[in-house]
Image (cartoon, rainbow, N blue to C red):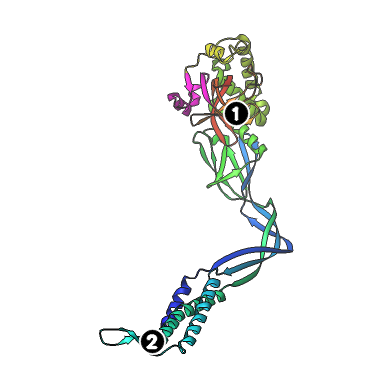
Amino acid sequence: MTRLLLCLALAATGCMRIENTVRTERGPLLRTFTRPQVMPGALHAELRVRWPELDVQLTERDVCRETTIEEYAEERITERAAPAAGPALSTGLATTLGAAVLFGLSFVMSPAPDTTLIDTAGRYGPSLRQQFQGYTLLSLGIGVPALIVGGIAFLRTGEDVEQRRVEQETSQKEAPCNPRPVTGTVQAKGPRGVSLPLPVKDGVGLVSAVTLPGPIDELVLGDRPIELDESGLLTLGAFSACVSLEVEGARAPESLSDGALVSRAERLSNCKQVRGDAVLAPLEAAEAELKKRRESGGPGAFAPGASVTSFEDAVSAYGPRLVFKAGSADLSRLDAPEQLEGQAVVMQGVVSYGLAQNIGVLELGGREVFVFIPQKRAWGGDFANGSRVEAVAVMAGWQTVGEKTLPLARLVWLRAAY
């Protein structure tokens, strides 16, 4: 009987639900300190042109980080409660006391069998004393397990307090540090698949324009890009413009289309920053031809500029034959924009973002195009990022701005698309 009661108590205890509540209380500030950390940084290059060579000075820098840490005391308090422990104890106490009372009363009851009942074997029914003692065992079978279960559950309740220290970052400062020269092979890459290995020893390397098949716009070491500051980007752009002119060779301005002439004048202007008077004569010739075409009003990219007063006028004057928009078959022509130089097109898309005061990016059905915005333009107003627009423009080959190389189009007219 004792084993049975114990098994019942253990089974009931396993089903008793214990609720855990955890709360955290922050204590006082213990101390404030700074934690230094050194992390791998970026590659940085400084460029200088001594035509026909580009002098590259390559360094690697770490990033030194200082993090300000505040350390607090913290208490993690776990409270355990058994909501059923109280009812179980009260039930067990009541039924156990009731069993004791019944057992005491059984001794004042008659021990004589109940002669009003008899079974088939001829035995009389239990006496009143035996009945009371049976009720006593029944009450004990309920009360004792309830007392055990409630007592164990009550003993499992309580509170645990864990004291610990926690850290909180309050500020962080980073700065490049530990510059050191790099030795390795740098790849000079260009927008049209140009890739030239550039040996660098002790941080110094030279790129010769004579060995370059085309312009370059990026320097990488393995899979790591090399950062250039604003001055470096301008120097690389000017050097690449000179390389493009060398590859292109001498060309008479009169033989060029309007778009090609504008692109050549821009490359000459950029190249002048590093070659100076060496390109002054062809630059003046290109600018003179541009001025002549603007003033003559002949056919081409500059012809109707003064007379165009609306989108419809621009379409009529330029007669665009290509339409760049989402779903247009003409979009594939943007893979070779150099073949479209001087051609007028219609573009319908979304203003993506602006890179400078006179250069923006249009998104045309998943393709991006640089658009050159003339300083003197007949249309009014500006268009925010995300605006849907349509434009008449003249294609002008490729354009590199920063790390991006995209087709370039010169705007003739721009308006909001409805």
Can see residue 187?
yes
Other-residue count near label 2 (Cα within 10 Å), few / some / many at <14 / 14–19 / ≥20:
some
Count of picture labels:
2
| Residue with the most extreme front position | 116
Instruction: Identify the secondary structure beneath mark 2.
Output: loop
Does label 2 or label 1 sit earlier along the sequence? 2
Point 53% across, 11% down: residue: 316
Q: CA distance from mark 2 to mark 1?
A: 108 Å
Of the numbered discs in the image, which one, if any, rests on residue 127? Answer: 2
Find residue 345 and report its horizontal and vertical position in percent: 51, 19
Q: Is residue 144 magenta?
A: no
Amino acid tagged 2 = Ser
Point 65% across, 57% down: residue: 38
Q: Which residue is mark 1?
A: 360
Q: Is residue 177 left or right of residue 363?
A: right
Q: Nearer the viewer, residue 406 or 253?
A: 406
The quarter of the image holding the C terminus is top right
Point 68% across, 26% down: residue: 277
Q: Nearer the viewer, residue 174 or 99?
A: 99
> What segment carries the magenta color?
322-349
Find residue 376 and report its horizontal and vertical position in percent: 66, 18
Can see residue 251?
no
Instruction: Identify the secondary structure beneath mark 1.
Output: strand
| Residue 186 vertical placement versus 8 (above, below) | above
| Residue 15 vertical placement versus 195 (above, below) | below
Q: Nearer the viewer, residue 99 or 39?
A: 99
Front disc: 2 or 1: 2
Amino acid tagged 1 = Gly
